[in-house]
Amino acid sequence: MKIIEHSFGPDLDWLPHYAEQLGGKIDGNFIIAPDNGIRYILPCGEGISAFYVDVTYNSDFHKIQKNRDTDFIGLYYNLTDGEATLTARDFMYNVSRWHYNLSVIDGLINTDYVVKSGSRTYGLAIFIKKSIIESYAKKENIVINQIEEITNPEKNTIIRFDRMSYDSYYILEELHKQKVGGPIFDFNLAGTVHLLISNYLRKLSTNKIILQTVNQTDLNNIILIQKYLIEHAEETFPSIKQMADMANMSESKFKILFRKITGSTPNVFFMENKLIKAKELLEEKQYSISQISDKFHFTNNSYFTSKFKEYYGLSPKIFIKHL
Amino acid sequence: MKRITHFYSLTPEWQHSFAKEMGGELIDNKIIVIPEDIGHGYSYFTQVTPGISVLYVDFVLDTPIKITRQKSDNELYIFHFDMSEHVNLIRINKIDYRIGTHEDLGLAIIDNKMKSTFKPAVGDRTLAVRLLVDKKLLDEFIKTHPSEEHGNRKISVPKKSLYYYDHIDSHSMLLIRSIKDRSVFDSSFESYLKGISLRLLGNFLDRYEHSQAVKDEITDVEIESVTKTQTYLLDNLYNPFPSVPFLSKMAGMSPSKYKMIFKKQFHNTPKNLFIEEKMILANRLLQSGDYKTLTEVIYELNYSKLSYFCSKYYELFHRKPADDLVKKKYNQKCITKSTLQ
């Protein structure tokens, strides 16, 4: 197991030390490390920095985060395929793709992040100065203390484990397709950072459910169903009954919880996911529209077209034409 | 018709005079609410990064207006993305450019040095994103991405009034559409708009860089199925040519499409490729010494006329088949005997 101790923050003074710990060096915005992973840093102005990571770990890896500069909040979007856990104080959470894939952590808190060998991490960490979040919270009348009381009663620090919205998930997946480095990527990365922040702030102000308060088993079951729906996007919609059975819940409980956790009903979620996948296939230009509509088990082409248009605002034909 | 004149700068100052002239209310130095007597809607202006600012407009007009942008000394490119579903007009140098998704031409890039007039249609929702980008920023990009096409690209010709006039690509279209549903008064709007602006610029530069790379693309599936027919041809060289309709059916496409893709992939027509391969096989057979006469060889290869075979053979090798024929020897026994010893 490799153990490193490091610090993060919106000011990038932690970089040289971090690179050194990894046994690598800084090259422009990249950190070149011996594990051949991609690590890319971009300051996005106004006290915001982004850290893009795409690494496959060959050995267990333990990162101890002790921040020297504590005046920031980190948003960690973590899409790890494999096993990754985060420990702080007296609790431990699984923070990979199918668990809590978004953690919001105050710079004051020291954390232990452990990734198992063989995991592939794709993630984006956004460091924001506290003053920015606070001014926003004031404007929107969000009482952060109240939200955070559950997790941390004794100190006024923020720590929250959450699932990113599906919207954010796809924004990140889109970024992942881009070639890293260069001015175009910088624009896209900075753009993505702003979009993610916006989505998160929006979620804060509209969605009051706190994921950590949901029963752990129920949550895992719902996420499993979500995963099942994503993996079976090409097939027809499984019935609510079937899914409720899979999740070991009653149908009504399943429907309510699914809606609470993912933000949409199973059917809407399934259809959106289908359309997103269909769009990706269209982008590749390997299949015709009717082939795709068949592939995703739409009853006919016109139904696919109308759904596509409803969701994206333009027909698949025009979409292909203007790519 | 109401006329409004204004100018642009990267900083939000220009909005004061603009709002005043229009009679609209300026909120927070970002949002201008369009007065009731003109129509209803908003504009939203914010600085994204140093050197990039964005203006988002979303309104429905009741009376026609003409918004004239005075030229100013700020060295700016103006990216105008128009997502309105009807036609708006931009007038530059006395030429009207029609813009909007309806026209398939939604993107125009204008130099801030040129005066331009924007005439939005009345009674329909006008939705547009304008990016103001410092010229230095893009020049730097063009310098760091030198490629031969830039000579022909409109953007590097500073004298033209309109640098770029094209449709909006699908990705950008989806991005702009996603703001449509958000309220400008939502406080997450600002960072969302900033994000969209940066992504739009990224998309544009990406497209600009790869603009010449667009080619007639053949999909992998098509290549695979055409290759399958080619293998079939090569496996059946002893038979007559199976006909293009048969092959195209096998590849699952129309005969004309099949021929086109086949030619692109193998630089030859199916029939020609078949004959060439057949002749190469014939050459091998002739020299194998297993045949007594030419007729035997051509029957083996399913030809009925010797003269036709000879002409095709000559076409490829510039030799007569008779010259290549190694006749079968009768004294087989002697050979086997000698090999036995």
Image (cartoon, coloured by chain):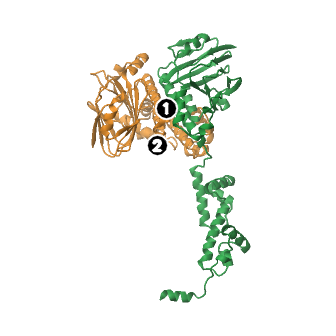
Chain colours: A orange, B green
Q: In this view, does A101 lie above or below A45?
A: below
Q: Quadrant of the image for the N terminus of chain B? A: top right
Mark 2 and mark 1 lie on one chain; the one further toward the N terminus is 1
Q: How many marks?
A: 2
Task: Identify residue for label 1.
Answer: A187
Q: In which quadrant of the rendered view does residue B128 lie?
A: top right
Which percent across, then down, holds residue B185? Answer: 51, 18
Secondary structure under the numbered disc 1 in the rendered image: helix
Determine whether, in the image, residue B26 is placed left or right of residue A218.
right
Which one is nearer the viewer's eye here, B262 or B209? B209
Which one is nearer the viewer's eye here, A98 or B57? B57
Q: Distance between the residues labelled 2 and 1?
A: 31 Å
Secondary structure under the numbered disc 2 in the rendered image: helix
Question: How packed is label 2: few (under 14 Cα within 10 Å), some, or many (20 or more)?
Answer: few
Task: Identify residue for label 2.
Answer: A231
Tell me which chain the residue with mark 1 is part of.
A
Which percent across, then down, holds residue A207? Answer: 43, 25
Q: Which residue is drawn at 70% across and 72% down?
A: B310
Tell me which chain the residue with mark 2 is part of.
A
Q: In which quadrant of the rendered view does residue A181 lie?
A: top left
- Report whether residue B96 is seen: yes
- Report whether residue B200 is seen: no
Which one is nearer the viewer's eye here, A157 or B275? B275
* Residue kind at label 1, given as amino acid type: Phe
Determine whether, in the image, residue B235 is placed left or right of residue A26.
right
Which percent across, then down, holds residue A313? Answer: 59, 32
Question: How packed is label 1: few (under 14 Cα within 10 Å), some, or many (20 or more)?
Answer: many
In this rendering, which labeled residue sits more in front, label 2 or label 1? 1
Determine whether, in the image, residue B314 is placed left or right of residue B175.
right
* Residue kind at label 2, given as amino acid type: Glu
